[in-house]
């Protein structure tokens, strides 16, 4: 007959449950919106250049507007989080390749200028060759803009972000593509929205697939992505993104279905950024997610 254990299994405890690492002081909604707007703007610039190459002027102008507007709004959100405009300008004084924020500043600043120049040329018809060249430049900087924010948050000690550094760029790239395609689907005529629809579907697949791989790999550290308010936000985001994909596949010729699916894509992308942001904050506040993985790594190294 097996003896029953008298002593219960040990559970993790910390000194009065206090956090071990400093919780990020980034503001809400400034930073989550900045994460979203960077992805939207970056992916929209690529969509705009694709529309220019294929001779789709309506989609081109819509995507260029989204790229320029997203970059401008993202810059405002970043400056508001920093507190003073000169702090953003100070980041442009020195380029530091080891700092994602420094690299991102040097991506955002020229991207905003190029995207705005491309849009101005498209709207006014002035200097079309220079405008097209600016659009190409924005499209080149678009993917780095859409994904550098993943490196920005993962290059921290926040467990739920740091441990997800492999998948997070793909999550943000897919989320940005879904948002860019979705916004264009809302505004573009149905007959010219096919490239935007394809981009949104591909982005949704990349985002949801990367999130699934991330959850499976993170194990215990991934709990904040599934629990509490972050978990609710991310579940709603998945539902909206999946619903947008299904509706865009079924209602390709319907203007109403195109607009509704586009809105679902955009809303899902916004909620993804807020969910990821709040999951990181939750993991920073709970010392379990800092100490337990460290102990596991030490035990693994000892073995």
Image (cartoon, rainbow, N blue to C red):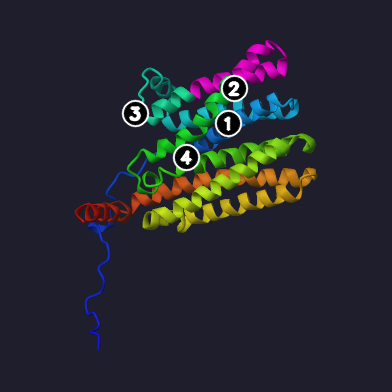
Query: Is the residue under label 2 in contact with that under label 3 (CB below 8 Å)?
Result: no
Residue 10 lies, in percent from the top left, at: 25, 68
Check residue 98 in the rendering and tell me which mark sits there, or answer none: 3
Q: Which residue in the structure is indicated by mark 4?
A: 169
Mark 4 element type: helix
Instruction: Please give the name of the residue rendered at 24% of the width and 58% of the height, measured from the top-left corner.
Output: 14
Q: Quadrant of residue 11?
A: bottom left
Q: Which residue in the structure is indicated by mark 2?
A: 115
Query: Is the residue under label 3 in contact with that under label 4 (CB below 8 Å)?
Result: no
Residue 65 within the segment the image draws in magenta: no
Residue 148 lies, in percent from the top left, at: 46, 33
Q: Which residue in the structure is indicated by mark 1?
A: 41
Residue 125 lies, in percent from the top left, at: 72, 14
Q: How far apart are the two marked residues, 4 and 3, measured between alpha carbons?
A: 17 Å
Mark 2 and mark 4 lie on one chain; the one further toward the N terminus is 2
Mark 3 element type: loop
Nearest to viewer (mark 3 / mark 2) = 3
């Amino acid at each position: 007959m097996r003896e029953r254990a008298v002593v219960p299994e040990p559970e993790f405890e910390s000194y009065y449950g206090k956090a071990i690492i400093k919780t990020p002081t980034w503001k809400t909604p400034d930073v989550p919106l900045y994460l979203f707007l960077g992805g939207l703007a970056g992916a929209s610039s690529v969509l705009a250049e694709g529309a220019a190459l294929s001779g789709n002027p309506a989609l081109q102008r819509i995507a260029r507007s989204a790229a320029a507007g997203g970059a401008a709004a993202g810059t405002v959100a970043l400056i508001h989080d920093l507190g003073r405009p000169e702090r953003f300008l100070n980041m442009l004084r020195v380029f530091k390749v080891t700092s994602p924020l420094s690299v991102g500043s040097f991506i955002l600043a020229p991207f905003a200028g190029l995207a705005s120049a491309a849009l101005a040329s498209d709207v006014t018809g002035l200097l079309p060759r220079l405008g097209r060249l600016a659009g190409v430049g924005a499209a080149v900087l678009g993917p780095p803009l859409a994904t550098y924010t993943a490196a920005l948050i993962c290059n921290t000690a926040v467990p739920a972000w740091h441990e997800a550094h492999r998948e997070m760029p793909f999550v943000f790239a897919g989320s940005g593509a879904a948002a860019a395609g979705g916004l264009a689907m809302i505004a573009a005529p149905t007959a010219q929205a096919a490239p935007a629809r394809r981009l949104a579907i591909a982005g949704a697949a990349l985002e949801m697939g990367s999130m699934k791989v991330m959850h499976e790999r993170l194990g215990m550290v991934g709990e904040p992505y599934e629990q509490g308010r972050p978990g609710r936000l991310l579940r709603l985001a998945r539902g909206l993104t999946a619903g947008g994909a299904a509706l865009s596949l079924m209602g390709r010729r319907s203007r109403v279905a195109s607009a509704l699916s586009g809105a679902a894509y955009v809303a899902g992308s916004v909620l993804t950024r807020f969910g990821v942001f709040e999951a990181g904050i939750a993991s920073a506040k709970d010392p379990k997610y800092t100490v337990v993985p460290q102990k596991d790594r030490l035990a693994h190294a000892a073995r």
